[in-house]
Image (tube, helix red, strand yellow):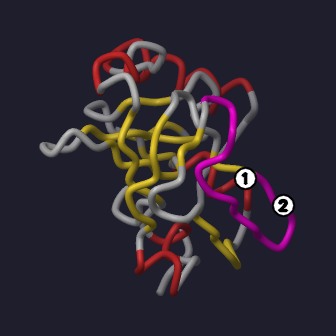
Amino acid sequence: MQYNGCEFRPELHYDKDFQIWIRPEQDGTLTVGMTDISQTIAGKILHVRVRRPGTLRPRGKPVATVESGKWAGPIPNLFDCVIEAGNPRVLAEPALLNIEPYEAWVARVRPSGGVEQALQRLLTGQQAADGYAERCRKEDIHCKRSAR
């Protein structure tokens, strides 16, 4: 699905601002990445820093930091978790987030209270699709992807 050229994947879970997506994994971890909206607003991603594996991150503290030519800021954490890993491909080539934001995940985390509890605050399915489309429309966001 797309809204103003911004790709939306209904199987993922999203924060209320549609900055990040989260995907549950079979091993009880959650994969965290930037949405198409987020990478477009940020511009060309120049640097990504993920907190050290094994680090406990309370809700509200960033899992990672992203820097672009026009923006620097956190990948927000929406639940208590432990950092499992950063994506080595993205750490080596941060611009992958601009090329393939849904394949180029940023970090894997293990939620402290379990997957179900972590996902409770997130949007998914039709509710997420409606909110994503509304943000694109309301803020006139038109997504662009970088080429390799």
At label 2, which amino acid type do we have? Trp
Quarter-wise, where is residue 72 in the image?
Answer: bottom right
Question: What secondary structure is marked by label 2?
Answer: loop
Residue at 56% x, 29% y is 78
Q: Earlier in the sequence, mark 1 or mark 2?
A: 1
- Name the residue tied to disc 2: 71
Residue at 36% x, 16% y is 117
Q: Does the magenta-highlighted stretch encompass residue 62?
A: yes
Residue nearest the observer in this picture, 35 or 65: 65
| 47 sits left or right of 32 in the view | right
Residue at 51% x, 30% y is 80
Q: In the picture shown, does residue 16 fall above or below 8?
A: above
Range covered by the magenta-colored residues: 59-73
| 2 sits left or right of 59 in the view | left
How far across and how far down the image is residue 74, in percent? 72, 50
Q: Does the magenta-highlighted stretch encompass residue 87?
A: no
Q: Residue furthest right?
A: 70
**How many discs appear?**
2
How far across and how far down the image is residue 86, in percent? 45, 66
Residue nearest the observer in this picture, 67 or 112: 112
Residue nearest the observer in this picture, 101 or 72: 72
The answer to whether the residue labelled 1 contacts the one labelled 2, judged by CB atoms less than 8 Å apart, is yes
How far across and how far down the image is residue 70, in percent? 87, 66
The crowd level at tag 1 (other Cα within 10 Å; few <14, some 14-19, many 20+) is: some
Residue 41: give its label.
1
The crowd level at tag 2 (other Cα within 10 Å; few <14, some 14-19, many 20+) is: few
- For the residues labelled 1 and 2, the Cα–Cα distance comes to 9 Å
